[in-house]
Structure formats: structure tokens, C-alpha cells
């Protein structure tokens, strides 16, 4: 588990190390123009959407470790060629390889966590994963920003070379992991992947969770660097440096709050925790509305805008030990990889649609933008409570079930809910 967590941190470090600088690298440093740079970002996202439906089946059939190693090799080659690419075609192919490799890492690592944890330890394991992912992204972005120099192509080449080296280091580290035995459907016919998706879509609780997940990612992550930042600059008069401060406040809140809220969260119903996140994000959007539509001073607007990002961070810290373990607990034995990949696909779709809708809306239609995402945040609470009606106690409140087992064995436990 320690090696898996180190792998999460390193893969996120690689993502934060280069992805924020892809646009400027292609458009300005390689002088390929803004159109090509926009296509590179689109290919980076599209590659993830293409490979994720197949990644789940590969994880189920082959296990998460071989799939992870293949993804790391692909991402390493993509990063290496991207640093050396000089033409538009090479840049696009390299971005596709890097995007595909990094997209597959997420469900593969998540499935490894599922295989190496129990129901009782899973929430804490996923909380640690989220903490290390944010830490890796932040450190990677910080170091990468100090290495790049738009006047020197060699500085970006060095950046991508280091990223490729990080992935190679991760290959060596992950190759030494000895995974516990887990059910694999190796005897399933190759053409039965459709059956796997049909089984998943027949799981009504999982379908509802995917809808909820889309709304969660669309209303939060899909707005961070698009609609919400455009709204802050255009409506609230926020400077670029203040926007950086707001993003830092988000990361700081996650780092500070992650383990403080863990004990509180893991002893409560998962769906009610998600519903509470919807209410917290509703308050966050009210704060954003005050920042851009209120008539206070610039200092008050700035404080409200930074508070919006901090409140989003609090909600994220509550979701990390809640949503990913729930996906794992909804999956039948041996097909967690399929469910993790499906949920990663939903996240990728929301991250693609969110900026496309939120960016123009946040930049020009300020009041409708805030109202739209206020309603989306409230929808999170409603969808979460509806999902709770479909879940068993073991899926919605595994801690209570674990405690009831302790009592059954003659141990001492705190009082639990009657339905447990």
C-alpha cells in the first residue's frame, strides 16, 4: 500500500509538472499557434475518453498492475516525444499518448488500493490517495513553474525529460509490488466486454452514482480553471495573482482538513456526507455571487472569492474517503477495475463539458452562471439522498456494520444505528 501511495504521488507530480504549461509550450515556445495548442489540449482529453472504456475490461482480465505498467510506458514515451516534437503532427500524437497513459493510471491505481485494503480501511486509504495526489500536483506545478523559460526551448525539453524519467522510476517501483490474489475473469471470452458494460448499466445504484458523480465533477472541478476563474476576473475584478492565492487556499484546505474530517466522515452515512458537501458548495457559490454581484469593497470581494475555493476544498476533503470506496463497494467481486474505469470516464466527461459550458457563461453571463451552479450544488444533495435509498447498510455505512460484527464476537463497541 505504501508503494501504491508513492505511485499516486509520483503520477500526480508528473501531471502537475507539465500539463499546466502545455498551451504556452505549443503556442509560443514551439511557435505552432493557438489553434494547434487548443487541439493539443483537446487531444489530451479525447485520448482519455477513448481508452477508459477499454481500460476497465483490461484491468478485470489482466489485473491492475500490468495495465498500470503499460500505461506508464505509454505516458513516458508520450512525454519524451513531446519534449522533442517540433511539428504539429508529432505534438498531437505525443499529447495523445501522454493523455491516454495518464488517464489509465487513475483506475489502475484505484483498483490496486481496493485489492490491498478491506472495507474498514478503504476510506482511509482513499483519503491518503487524494491527499498525496493534491500534494503531487501542487509540488509538480511549483517546481515546473520555476524551471520553464519561454525564451528557451531547452527548458521545456528538460521539463518533459524529467517527467518521462519520473514515469520510468514509477515503473521500477511498481514492478516490485506483489499484489494479493484477487478474482480475475481470465476465462471470459474476449467479445464479452459488452456484457461487462451491460452488467454495470444494470446496476441501478451504480448508474445513479455515475449521474451524481457527473454533477459533482461538473459543478466543482470543471469550473476551477475555466468558468469560476473567468467569473472572478470579469465580474469580481480579481487579479491573476489573487486567482493563484485562491487555488493555493483550496489546496491548503485539503491538506489541513483531509485527516481532520476523516474520522467524522467515515462514521457517517456516505450519501449524507455527499449531501452535506452539496450544501457546503451551495454556500461557496453564494460567496462567489457576493464577490462578483455584491456591492462591497474590493477587499471584501477578494475575501469572498478566496473563501469560495477554500469551501470547495473542504467539500473535496469530505468526498475523497466517501465516493471512491463507494464505487468499490458497489462493484461485484473481481470487477472493481471496470467500475473504477467507468467512474473515471464519467469524471473525464464532466471535466470536458464543464469548461466548455462554464467558461463562456462565467465570463459574460454572471448572474445566470451563479444561479446555475447554485442549483447544481443543491442537486448534489438531492441526488445523494435518493441514492441512499438504493444502498444497503454495508454500502452506505460500512463502519456501523464493522462495529456490529465486533459486538457479535463479544467485543465492545459504541452504539450504532438501529438498522445496522
Image (cartoon, helix red, strand yellow):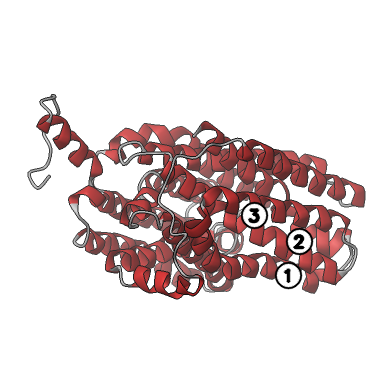
321, 404: nearer the viewer: 404
Whether the residues at callouts 2 and 1 have beta carbons within 8 Å, the answer is: yes
Q: Report the Cα–Cα distance between label 1 and label 3.
A: 24 Å
103, 115: nearer the viewer: 115
- Residue 77 point in image, percent of width and height: 77, 54
Q: Which mark is residue 38?
A: 1
- Residue 254 point in image, percent of width and height: 48, 40
The residue pinned by badge 2 equals 23
- The structure residue drawn at horizontal position 82% and vertical position 46%, both measured from the top left corner, is 161
Residue 4 placement, left or right of 219: right
Q: Secondary structure at mark 3?
A: helix
Residue 381 placement, left or right of 14: left
Q: Secondary structure at mark 2?
A: helix
**Against 129, is 71 above or below?**
below
Residue 355 placement, left or right of 30: left
Q: Which mark is residue 218?
A: none
Q: Earlier in the sequence, mark 3 or mark 2?
A: 2
Amino acid at each position: 500500500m505504501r508503494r501504491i501511495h508513492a505511485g499516486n504521488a509520483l503520477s500526480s507530480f508528473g501531471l502537475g509538472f507539465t500539463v499546466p504549461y502545455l498551451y504556452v509550450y505549443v503556442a509560443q515556445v514551439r511557435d505552432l499557434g493557438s489553434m494547434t495548442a487548443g487541439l493539443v489540449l483537446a487531444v489530451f482529453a479525447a485520448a482519455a475518453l477513448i481508452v477508459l472504456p477499454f481500460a476497465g475490461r483490461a484491468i478485470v482480465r489482466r489485473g491492475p498492475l500490468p495495465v498500470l505498467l503499460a500505461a506508464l510506458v505509454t505516458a513516458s514515451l508520450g512525454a519524451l516525444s513531446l519534449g522533442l516534437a517540433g511539428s504539429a503532427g508529432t505534438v498531437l500524437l505525443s499529447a495523445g499518448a501522454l493523455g491516454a497513459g495518464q488517464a489509465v493510471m487513475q483506475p489502475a491505481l484505484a483498483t490496486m488500493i481496493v485489492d490491498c485494503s478491506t472495507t474498514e480501511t478503504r476510506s482511509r486509504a482513499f483519503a491518503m490517495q487524494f491527499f498525496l495526489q493534491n500534494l503531487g500536483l501542487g509540488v509538480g506545478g511549483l517546481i515546473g513553474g520555476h524551471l520553464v523559460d519561454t525564451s528557451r526551448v531547452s527548458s521545456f525539453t528538460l521539463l518533459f525529460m524529467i517527467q518521462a524519467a519520473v514515469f520510468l522510476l514509477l515503473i521500477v517501483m511498481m514492478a516490485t509490488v506483489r499484489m494479493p490474489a484477487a478474482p480475475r475473469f481470465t476465462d471470459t471470452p474476449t467479445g464479452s466486454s459488452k456484457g461487462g458494460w451491460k452488467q454495470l448499466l444494470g446496476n441501478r445504484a451504480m448508474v445513479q452514482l455515475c449521474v451524481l458523480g457527473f454533477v459533482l465533477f461538473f459543478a466543482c472541478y470543471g469550473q476551477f480553471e475555466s468558468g469560476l476563474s473567468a467569473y472572478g476576473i470579469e465580474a469580481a475584478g480579481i487579479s491573476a495573482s489573487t486567482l493563484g492565492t485562491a487555488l493555493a487556499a483550496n489546496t491548503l484546505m485539503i491538506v489541513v482538513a483531509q485527516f481532520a474530517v476523516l474520522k467524522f466522515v467515515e462514521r457517517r452515512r456516505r450519501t449524507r456526507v455527499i449531501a452535506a458537501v452539496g450544501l457546503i458548495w451551495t454556500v461557496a457559490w453564494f460567496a462567489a455571487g457576493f464577490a462578483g454581484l455584491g456591492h462591497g469593497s474590493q477587499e471584501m470581494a477578494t475575501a469572498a472569492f478566496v473563501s469560495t475555493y477554500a469551501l470547495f476544498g473542504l467539500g473535496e476533503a469530505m468526498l475523497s474517503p466517501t465516493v471512491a470506496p463507494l464505487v468499490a463497494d458497489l462493484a461485484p467481486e473481481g470487477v472493481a477495475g471496470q467500475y473504477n474505469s467507468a467512474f473515471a470516464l464519467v469524471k473525464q466527461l464532466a471535466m470536458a463539458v464543464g469548461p466548455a459550458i462554464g467558461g463562456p457563461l462565467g465570463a459574460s453571463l454572471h448572474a445566470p452562471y451563479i444561479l446555475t451552479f447554485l442549483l447544481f450544488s443543491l442537486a448534489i444533495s438531492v441526488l445523494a439522498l435518493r441514492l441512499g435509498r438504493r444502498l444497503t447498510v454495508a454500502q452506505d455505512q460500512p463502519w456501523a456494520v464493522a462495529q456490529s460484527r465486533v459486538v457479535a464476537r463479544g467485543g465492545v463497541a459504541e452504539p450504532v444505528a438501529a438498522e445496522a
